[in-house]
Amino acid sequence: MSHLPPGPRAPKLLTTHRLLAEPSKYMTQWRDRFGDPFTASAVNGTVVVTGRPDLIEAMFRADARDYDPFAAEAVAPLVGERSLFTLRGEAHRRERKLVMPPFHGARMRAYADTMAEAATVGFAPLADGTTHRMQDAMQAISLDVILRAVFGLEDDDGPDDYGEAIVGLIESAHPALIFMPFLQVELGGWGPWARFRRRFDRVDAQLDAQLARRREAPGDDILSMLLGARYEDGAAMSDTQIKDELRTMVVAGHETTALALSWAVDAVHRHPEVLARLRDEIDALGPDPSPESLARCRYLDAVIKETLRRYPILTESMRQLNAPLRWGDHDLPAGVAVAASIILAHQNPDHFPAPERFDPDRFVGKNYSPPVYLPFGGGHRRCVGAAFAHFEMKIVLGRLLADYDVALQAPSAPRPHRRNITMAPHDGVPVRLTRRRSRASGRCVSAA
């Protein structure tokens, strides 16, 4: 048995820069050169990377007590010390059990009309004959869903002010600040970290105000459910805990959903056969399809899944070992991190032939195990909002294709570009929308 596997020997700062700037390029280059798994020495520590399903499965099956979230100290200033992103061990298990229910089943489906309305309102101003960035539109729609379904904001609560503050906070979270914690220093109120802290404080004050509103007048939103939730011992969540989870939902749910939808719009409209088949399925639902009927469409479901495979929003799922781990042919010591590379897993030709091709048929009537297909991570720390996000994506994309013709304004597909912890289309997907005047007949097959 060997210790750490081989890997790039570039300086830590340079290695980190490469992984941040062009993860697809360097992940595949290093795997081809050093094998799988390989070791990378990044600023936040030593990381052993794999795309192999057997090693990913071993990582996801490992006892939750044997690992911690990777670089939790770096992410904590953005989401908070009590976020699911940063909690460890038993505290994470207890919090996850409390936070998860609203994002599944009937509670999740209750927000279908909110999602459809946000899409209808968000797309309407774009059909004005000018060019718009689809990424901006999808971010506005996704944020509106979170503000209304999660935060419980109503029109007279000033959702635009909340939205502006949240967008400002996310925009100020430069990837260098997240991945290089030594930059998290205030310089007498100047510099990027000071600007981030000011925006964080503004959002925090707004969350305090909304907690007070919902404590006084509970609704059917997720915030109200969290205020009423109780741990096994009967204790309630503190305001700090709730605010940290709300920030986590914004960071994990707002931008990731919007970016996935932007990639989907671009990919679908660069593949006419996919667009035609998708349109037939949606048009079969009638002139004003219900959100529930859109969510049941089988090919639409496959398009979303293939988008997440072909254009992963997050590049890896990571764990920090706090106990030694035997990983394949390697004995890893406590202190190193293991990374399931979503990029490498999703580009594996053994499971996805011709992986560079956008082919939703891969997912029609077929499911893949988490070690093979992991857009939302896996194991004990899989994204609690995965089902909610997937449900929302189907409704929003379905609503767009039902109501509008989309003309892409860029001649070629965008390259992935790092925003913060996410990968976005570098051009934002410029489009022109026109309202559809006619519908073709077709057939919708309910999703399995």
Image (spheres, rainbow, N blue to C red):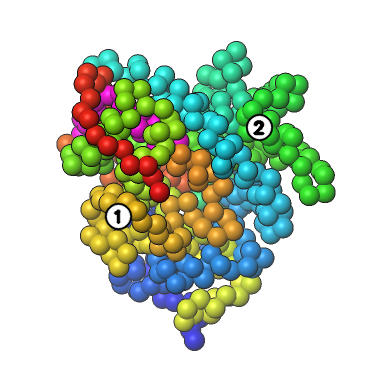
The count of marks equals 2
Residue at the image point whose x is 61% and y is 16% from the top: 157
Q: From where the camera sits, is residue 39 visible?
A: no
- The residue lying toward the viewer, choosing from 18 and 65, is 65
Nearest the viewer among 263 and 43 is: 263
Q: Residue at x 34, y 69 (%)?
A: 31
**Tag 2 near tag 1, CB within 8 Å:** no
The x, y position of residue 131, in whole percent, is 26, 22
Secondary structure found at label 1: helix
Residue farthest toward the bottom in the current orientation of the protein: 1
Q: 78 or 317: nearer the eye?
A: 317
Which residue does the numbered mark 2 point to in the structure image?
223
User: Is residue 128 visible to us here?
Assistant: yes
Residue type, label 2: Leu
Residue 201 highlighted magenta (yes or no): no
Residue at figure coordinates x 35%, y 33% from the top left: 397
Q: Residue at x 29, y 61 (%)?
A: 352
> Rounded to the nearest whole Å, what is the CA distance between mark 2 and mark 1?
37 Å
Q: For residue 270, which quarter of the picture? A: top left
| Image position, residue 412 (x, y; %) | 19, 40
Residue 160: x, y in percent? 52, 19
Residue 408 within the magenta-colored segment of the rendering:
yes
> Which label sits on residue 362?
1
Left or right: 107 as drawn, with respect to 10: right
Determine whether the residue tagged by mark 2 lies in a helix, strand or loop.
Answer: helix
Magenta-drawn segment: 392-410
**Residue 17: % across, % down:** 40, 54
**Chief secondary structure of the magenta span?**
helix
Between disc 2 and disc 1, the foreground one is 1
Identify the disc placed on residue 132. none
**In this picture, residue 7 sits left or right of residue 219:** left
